Structure formats: C-alpha cells, structure tokens
Amino acid sequence: MPVISRFYGIIIKMYFQQSEHNPPHFHAVYGEYMGAFDIKTLEMIEGDLPAKGQALVREWAIHHKEDLLKIWDTQEFKKLPPLE
C-alpha cells in the first residue's frame, strides 16, 4: 500500500488494486491504531483510531479531498503534503 502522506506520526496510505472495494477510501495508521476513511464524507468507516487522530486525519483530508478522489479514480500514485 503506497504511502500518500505522513504527519504527526500518522501515515496515510491507499490501496492501488482494481479489486479494492468501495466506497472510495484511504487508510490512516498511527502506531498500533488504524482507521479507514471514506473520502467523500471523511467519516471513519472501519478501525480503532483514537478521536484525536481522527480529527487530525479529517483536518488533513479536507485540504486534499479532490486529490484523494483523483488518486482513487486514476490509481496514479501521488504524494500529498503533510498537515502543518
């Protein structure tokens, strides 16, 4: 799973396989915790990422929503800037 971005110890990844299921989503890993986030709603649809981690991921994703959807649709890997 390619790494899209890293910030505050959080790693953002996305699968690049035709068989990957919908809805369009990305994965956030923070230590032993993981969360899968719906790109369109930014809701965590799976995982156990703590609330503070979820808030940081959503804040980052708001700024990169269009890019994330484009990466999902085209499956063209692109690194995105971290949350600052």
Image (spheres, rainbow, N blue to C red):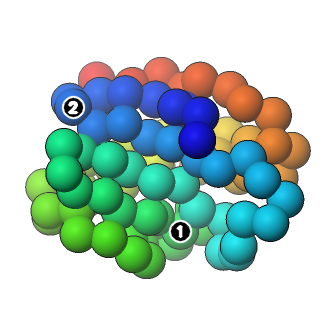
Q: Which residue is mark 1?
A: 38
Say which quadrant the N terminus sits in. top right
Give me the disc on residue 69. none
- Judge by depth and name the residue closer to the eye, 20 or 59: 20
Instruction: Relative to 5, say whether 51 is above or below.
Output: below
Measured Cα–Cα span from mark 1 to mark 2: 21 Å
Residue 70 as seen in the image, left or right of residue 10: right
Secondary-structure class at tag 1: strand
Category of crowding for the residue at label 2, using alpha-carbon neighbours closer than 10 angstroms: few (below 14), some (14–19), many (at least 20): few
Say which quadrant the C terminus sits in. top left
Residue 84 as seen in the image, left or right of residue 79: left
- Judge by depth and name the residue closer to the eye, 55 or 30: 30
Secondary-structure class at tag 2: loop
Q: Amino acid at mark 1?
A: Asp
Q: Name the mark nearer the viewer: 1 or 2.
A: 2
Q: Amino acid at mark 2?
A: Gly
Q: Quick check: can you spot residue 66?
A: no
* Quadrant hosting residue 30: top left
Please state the horizontal and vertical placement of residue 66, each as a whole percent of the image.
Answer: 67, 46
